Image: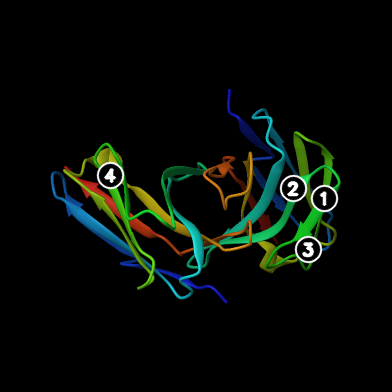
């Protein structure tokens, strides 16, 4: 059974710092991995999707990497801003399945 | 206007009551999903539907039922609500399978409290 773990569970940093969020999964037979952002009282917004054949994806200040063989992904946020404060979730899709398996999330606070 | 809407946004009910949560989408997607989120547990899949005639159980379907009334509408019912069904419920849609390049698009969530 696929299990997805995110470390740390919570992170508080000053504005301007570069930071890394970690995601690990137990079954490397994945089709893709996604990073989502969740704001309080709102749904999830997809940030980046990495296919299993890809190593990384970039969008603005965000860069997500994938090491499928070791079951790890990282989300790198450059020059963090208070508006980046949210919960970040990673999720994997297994081969031959249409189901997303979510991690428990990292709650990020960026203070001025 | 939001592409995926959920009603109600908040609901407080009592044990034993029947509750229906509704989801509508304007994205024209075939696939729709219901998840619940509990603190510290992430999102868990309850039911999903690949088209109007296709309904599938997810990880935690016990105590829930669904109805796909149309391509754009997917409802989740709790036949007899119990307190451990207190959670945040999300609906999501996708165009093709998430095994491809399409992500899932989420509604704003319904916060359900069962007393």
Q: Which element is circle 1 on?
A: strand
Q: Are marks 4 and 1 on the same chain?
A: no
Identify residue for label 1: B54
- C-alpha gap between disc 2 and disc 4: 31 Å
Q: Which element is circle 2 on?
A: strand
- C-alpha gap between disc 3 and disc 4: 44 Å
Q: Are marks 2 and 1 on the same chain?
A: yes
Q: Which element is circle 4 on?
A: strand
Q: Are marks 4 and 1 in contact (CB under 8 Å)?
A: no
Q: Residues within 10 Å of mark 1 (few under 14, many from 20)?
A: few
For image coordinates 63% across by 39% down, the residue present is B95
> Please, is residue B62 above or below residue B13 in the view?
below
Q: Residues within 10 Å of mark 4 (few under 14, many from 20)?
A: some
Q: Residues within 10 Å of mark 3 (few under 14, many from 20)?
A: some
Identify residue for label 4: A62
Identify residue for label 2: B50
Q: Is residue B74 left or right of residue B84?
A: right
Q: Are marks 3 and 4 in contact (CB under 8 Å)?
A: no
- Marks 3, 4: nearer the viewer: 4
For image coordinates 76% across by 42% down, the residue present is B74
Q: Are marks 2 and 3 on the same chain?
A: yes
Chain holding disc 4: A
């Amino acid at each position: 059974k696929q299990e997805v773990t995110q470390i740390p569970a919570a992170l508080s940093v000053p504005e301007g710092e570069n930071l890394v969020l970690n995601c690990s999964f137990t079954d490397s037979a994945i089709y893709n991995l996604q990073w989502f952002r969740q704001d309080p009282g709102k749904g999830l917004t997809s940030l980046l999707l990495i296919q299993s054949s890809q190593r990384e994806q970039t969008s603005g200040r965000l860069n997500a990497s994938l090491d499928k063989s070791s079951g790890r992904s990282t989300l790198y946020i450059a020059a963090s801003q208070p508006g980046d404060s949210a919960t970040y979730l990673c999720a994997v899709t297994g081969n031959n399945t249409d189901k997303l398996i979510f991690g428990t999330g990292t709650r990020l606070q960026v203070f001025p | 206007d939001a592409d995926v809407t959920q009603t109600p946004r908040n609901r407080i009910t009592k044990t034993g009551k029947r509750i229906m949560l509704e989801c509508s989408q304007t994205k024209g997607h075939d696939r729709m999903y219901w998840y619940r989120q509990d603190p510290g547990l992430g999102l868990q899949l309850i039911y999903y539907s690949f088209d109007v005639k296709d309904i599938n159980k997810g990880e935690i379907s016990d105590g829930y039922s669904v109805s796909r009334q149309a391509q754009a509408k997917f409802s989740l019912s709790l036949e007899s609500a119990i307190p451990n069904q207190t959670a945040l419920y999300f609906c999501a849609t996708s165009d093709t399978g998430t095994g491809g390049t399409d992500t899932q698009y989420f509604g704003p969530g319904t916060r359900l409290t069962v007393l």
